[in-house]
Image (tube, rainbow, N blue to C red):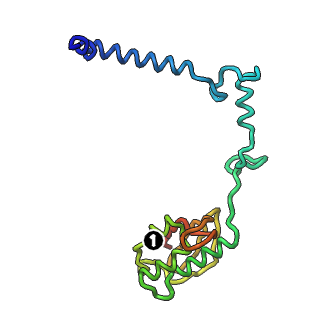
Amino acid sequence: MNRALRIIFSRYGIVVIILVLVLGVIALASQRKQTPLDGGGNTANGGSSSEASSEAFTEDDGLATENCDGDDCYPEEELPQEAVDRSVEFAEVWLNPNGYSASGWYDTLVPFLTDDQAELMQGVDPISVPATEITGEPVPDGLKVGIPMDTGTLTLTMTEGSNNSTELDWLVSAIDWEQS
């Protein structure tokens, strides 16, 4: 037994083991089935795989718009007015006009936030809010709403969902601040 182990763990034994493993991987790789994206082989109906792959690429995936060129080939999602209104409601509460303490302010924000965003806001002090008033109309852009304020722009990413406080509604999933 000791002699067999000495042979296996010698440099020649290790080279033989590695060689067997490499040949095994090559054998397994050459035996795998070819997919239409491989560019080779035949399909079950006797046609070439290039025909099958062409058909796979022409199927409608629901994202691209018809007759488009360049970067304009994907439709932009637009928020409904109720999502924009909900973002403004959040911004009004975020400004803390009633002077709530940190925990009271947090409790007023929770119905507007996704669970993940609510977790991030936990422990934030309302004194850190860098603005005091909304100064313009909200500007929707895709799934985001920019709300101009006296010292910058509050950008909220909106998503439809529910949390522990709210049934299905538009919720704030991300908060961003840009100082002006």
Q: Quadrant of residue 80?
A: bottom right
In the figure, residue 81 lies in which quadrant? Answer: bottom right
Question: In screen coordinates, is 163 left or right of 65?
Answer: left
* In front of the other: 154 or 170: 170
Outermost residue, left side: 2
In the rendered image, the vertical position of residue 125 relative to residue 14, given as above or below:
below
* Of residues 68 and 22, the one drawn nearer to the viewer in this rendering: 22
Q: Residue at x 48, y 79 (%)?
A: 107
Q: How many marks?
A: 1
Against 119, is 16 above or below? above
Q: Amino acid at mark 1?
A: Met
Q: x and y percent of residue 104 in the render?
A: 45, 82
What residue sits right under mark 1 in the picture?
Answer: 121
Indicate the quadrant containing the N terminus: top left, top right, bottom left or bottom right.
top left
x, y percentage for residue 9?
26, 17
Residue 101 appears in which quarter of the rendering?
Answer: bottom left
Give percent across and percent down for residue 52. Answer: 73, 29
Q: Residue at x 64, y 27 (%)?
A: 35
| Point 51% across, 20% down: residue | 28
Residue that sits furthest to the front in the current view: 1
Q: Residue furthest right?
A: 67
Residue 92 placed where, x, y %? 56, 81
What residue sits 56% from the left and 19% below the top? 31
| Relative to 68, residue 2 above or below | above
Q: For mark 1, does the 10 Å Cα neighbourhood hold few (<14), some (14 to 19), or many (20 or more) residues? A: some
Front residue of 11/141: it is 11
Element type at mark 1: helix
